[in-house]
Amino acid sequence: MASKKMRVVVGLSGGVDSAVTAHLLKQQGHEVVGIFMKNWEDDDDSDYCASNIDFVDAAAVADVLGIEIEHINFAADYKDRVFAEFLREYQAGRTPNPDILCNAEIKFKAFLDHALRLGAEKIATGHYARVRQAPTGLWELLKGLDAGKDQSYFLHRLNQAQLSKTLFPVGELHKTEVRRIAGEIGLPNAKKKDSTGICFIGERPFRDFLNRYIAKAPGPIKSDSGRVIGEHVGLSFYTLGQRQGLGIGGVKAKGAQLKALQAQGMRGAGEHEPWFVARKDLAHNTLWVVQGHDHPWLLSNRLLAQDCSWVAGVAPHLGTMAAKTRYRQADAPCELLASSDAACELHFGQAQWAVTPGQSAVLYDGEVCLGGGVIHACNALTPEAFLPALHA
């Protein structure tokens, strides 16, 4: 943390992490100003997205800390820059990660620009990550010290200009310590539940929410043997690796499928193994499912990511590193076989489960987040060569 006393604008969400962030900065002698961002309006009075309640909590925190707070509306920016892309990706059969785009386009662009207009030297948020300036002068994005809360995955698209203006005070702490501090100083939201769900939209019945924007287009659900075993409500409403909500529980493997599973030595083949979404065929509006968590269709040791963003501003050197293909995943050793400013190819020594187009592959060198890109293809989905796209 910089020792120079600065004017720092903190994004106060109403949650405990941003509240403790503001407290720590004020404790260090900085001039702290809070901003509450309203980014969703369509059903803001619902139980799932009540930003007015969050603002009351944020204002109460500001009152306890003795800092100013401003309420600002970025809903139009969010809808144009984040939500529209979110819907386009789902309609294309992919599974996007709106939190990543929201960070890049709203929290560290629209919010940062506004804070700078207010005379801020830095901004701060309650993310569990860290920023460090290397001896070379480059800014590095580091994992948060609390491995269970680390959010660097969601921040991997931040660039040098954004990182140079950003502080993540709680990234140096564990969540238990954050809660302890909040309780000790009497913050009103010290025990408030962590927010989950879609960035700024909240935790809600997702299929019902998506159905308001994307029309249902039912079609067949097929097993890997080609047998029709059910009907889906629309490919946009499913994601690879999904187990719940398929409506085909209890269907047993039969015939050639059973023999294939048994030949692979799969545990419980032929019993009531759970079904998982393995492929989405948009051309034929078909949802393909497989039985068993370790079915080959769910495993990939190679992927191509596009629309890459590198923290250092240039692609990392080829070689051994680690990557995550989804947030709740341990770092997996891999080889960066090819990379450019726009794409990269990764090979994993151990096959990764349910690698999903639309999600992000994020690369790490130890605790340093290098950046990453949007997963475009993997060998489980497209056994044919996909590498020409990398060198186009």
Image (cartoon, grey):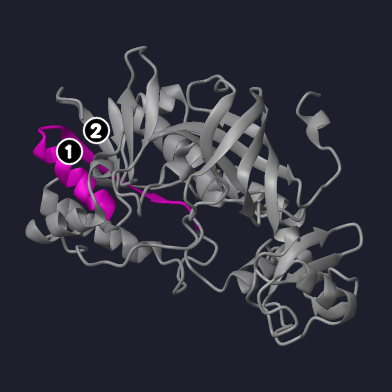
C-alpha gap between disc 1 and disc 2: 8 Å
Please provide the residue range marked out in magenta: 17-40
What residue sits right under mark 1 in the picture? 25
Up/down of 113 relative to 283, above or below: above
Quadrant in which the N terminus is drawn: top left
Q: At which x and y percent is residue 280?
A: 79, 60
Which is more toward the observer, 66 or 197? 197
Which amino acid, mark 2?
A: Val
Residue at (27, 25) in percent of width and height = 121
Which is more toward the observer, 2 or 367? 367
Res 369 → quadrant = top left
Q: What element carries label 2?
A: strand
Residue 33 within the segment the image draws in magenta? yes
Up/down of 373 relative to 300, above or below: above
Q: Which is closer to the viewer, label 1 or label 2? A: 1
- Is the Cβ of the residue at disc 1 closer than 8 Å to that at disc 2? yes
Residue at (37, 34) in percent of width and height = 142
What residue sits right under mark 2 in the picture? 8
Q: Is residue 166 left or right of residue 251?
A: left
Which amino acid, mark 1?
A: Leu
Res 271 → quadrant = bottom right
